[in-house]
Amino acid sequence: MTSNAGRPTSPEFLPDLDWFKSSASSANGGCLEVAFMDDGRVALRDNENLTNPPFVVSRHVWECFLDGATKGEFSIQD
């Protein structure tokens, strides 16, 4: 994952967080970014539209999502 710390956003939603995205993300955006909050919650945002506020979930919800993603439960079906 690569960090986007210090990159300006507009508007400034949760500006003090270090946002990360997958190294597979293109330079032109198109990736979900995550930031880990001091209280254990996880913030998510779409870097194609930073005017939308981040979505914040508990650590438990994030861990459940990662478990499902690892198991392929969210794979797009053709």
Image (tube, rainbow, N blue to C red):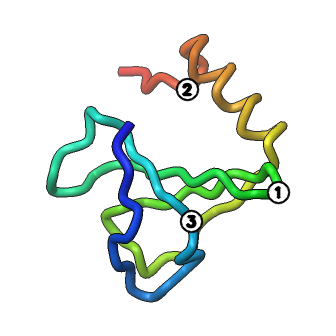
Amino acid marked by disc 2: Phe
Frontmost of labels 3 and 2 is 3
**Residue 77 versus residue 8: which sits nearer the camera?**
8
Q: Residue at x 36, y 62 (%)?
A: 47
Residue 74 is labelled as 2
Q: Residue at x 38, y 50 (%)?
A: 3
Which numbered disc flags the more N-terminal residue, 3 or 2? 3
Q: Position of residue 60 (x, y in %)?
A: 84, 37
Q: Position of residue 25 (x, y in %)?
A: 26, 41
The N terminus lies in quadrant: top left
Which numbered disc flags the more N-terminal residue, 1 or 2? 1
Q: Is residue 72 left or right of residue 4?
A: right
Circle 2: is it few (<14), some (14-19), or many (20+) Cα within 10 Å?
Answer: few
15 to 17, vertically: above or below: below
Q: Is residue 59 left or right of residue 74?
A: right
Provide the secondary structure element on which disc 2 rests.
loop
Residue pointed to by mark 1: 39
Residue pointed to by mark 3: 17
Q: Are marks 1 and 2 in contact (CB under 8 Å)?
A: no
Provide the secondary structure element on which disc 1 rests.
loop
The C terminus lies in quadrant: top left
Distance in Å between CA atoms under marks 1 and 3 = 12 Å
**Residue 66 versus residue 23: which sits nearer the camera?**
23
Frontmost of labels 1 and 2 is 1
Provide the secondary structure element on which disc 3 rests.
loop
Q: Position of residue 59 (x, y in %)?
A: 79, 42
Amino acid marked by disc 1: Asp
Q: Residue at x 48, y 22 (%)?
A: 75
